[in-house]
Amino acid sequence: METTRLKRFAQFARRSLLEQVAAKLRFVLAESGAARRESAEAVAKLEEAIKNHGKDQIIDRVAYTWFNRFCALRFMDVKRYTGVGVVSPALGQFQPEILTEAKMGHIDEELAPEKIRRHIFALLDGQTTSPDPQGEAYRLLVASVCNSLHRAMPFLFQRINDYTELLMPDDLLSGDSILAYTREAMTPDACENVEVIGWLYQYYISEKKDAVFEGLKKNKKVTPDNIPAATQLFTPHWIVRYLAENSVTDGICKVLINKKDRTVIGVHMIGSYVSEMIVSACMMIEMQMRAEDVQEIIFPHPTVCEIIREAVFKL
């Protein structure tokens, strides 16, 4: 697989999404902003998340969430898993197919609740005023698709938090939008194999990984939020196949926590190549991470390393 274009796109996408989400965050948190009036509960949750995790971490997390969603939706569009193109236009069209269908009065009833469908139609018909009616309607469609896929595939599409939807990038329809660049990079040829998603994840965090290792050279500790960037590496399918065919695949992962403060105090792993995965667990113990902290770490999927996070969810 030719990965040069994927690398350029993923690194650009991270920088662009971080910038767009940060700008949207400033807009949403404005004291006199519409978001505080129209989505007060979501804004309150956002402010609580910033208080607990810090503004930079929330921006990073939301940016990656949307990168992950857009790439997954593009792959599913190319494979026609979605039925109607969510981020991809129909042949000969420019706008995403799902928006074109909505403008003609067609929205799958199973996709979105009636209240949201009525709001989308009102925006597109001009009955509801908006500075960007088509953009707002399309963002509602994308959020509805993601939440619908959560019901079908909760292991892949986690439900979008209210504030994650609030921080969705504004420009998704122009020729310079993040979706336009996603379609350009994820061509039908690139999407022939699902491992394209793995390459995109690796390249998305590559610049952050380089920064983490530069910090290590200066004796800076790796924070919990940087563990995935420091330890994860996408494994191409041919290596996975070799390992599966030449190793014992059974094993276990047991995580021990302190009952009082729920910090990780030990991890037992048995199986092939666990010595290459245990480093993540060592860092969790060293930094006295709580079980809830581990649960919020974004691990690449599907990989063996995420077994640690899955084990924590069983506690």
Image (spheres, grey):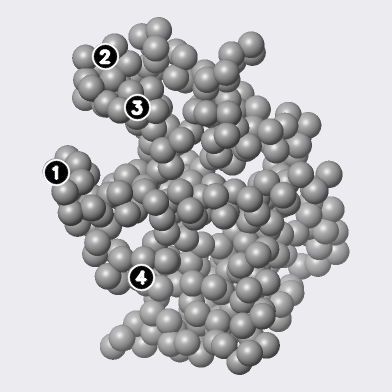
In the picture provided, is 104 more to the left or to the right than 176? left
Q: Quadrant of residue 79?
A: top right
The disc placed on residue 293 is: none
Quadrant for residue 230, please give it: bottom right
Is residue 222 found left or right of 49 in the rendered image? right
Q: Which circle's residue, 4 or 1, is located before the other in the chain?
A: 1
Q: Residue under label 4, please give it.
A: 54
Residue 248: x and y in percent read 76, 67
Given residues 288 and 16, the one toward you in this image is 16
- Which is closer to the viewer, label 3 or label 1? 3
Residues under numbered marks 3 and 1 in contact, where contact means CB atoms less than 8 Å apart: no
- What residue is at 39 percent from the left and 51 percent from the top? 23
Comparing 219 with 102, the one in front is 219
| Of the image marks 4 and 3, the number of the one nearer the N terminus | 4
Q: Are marks 3 and 2 in contact (CB under 8 Å)?
A: no
Residue sitting at x 78%, y 31%: 189
Q: Which residue is mark 3?
A: 132
Residue linked to disc 1: 37
- Residue at figure coordinates x 31%, y 66% from the top left: 50
Q: Is residue 73 visible?
A: no
* Position in image of residue 80 (x %, y %): 61, 24
The disc labelled 4 sits on which kind of residue? Gly
Q: Is residue 260 above or below residue 63?
A: below
Q: Residues within 10 Å of mark 4 (few under 14, many from 20)?
A: few
In what element is the residue under mark 4? loop
First along the sequence among labels 3 and 1: 1
* Percent coordinates x, y for residue 199 in the rendering: 71, 52
Q: Amino acid at mark 2?
A: Gly
Q: Quadrant of the C terminus?
A: bottom left
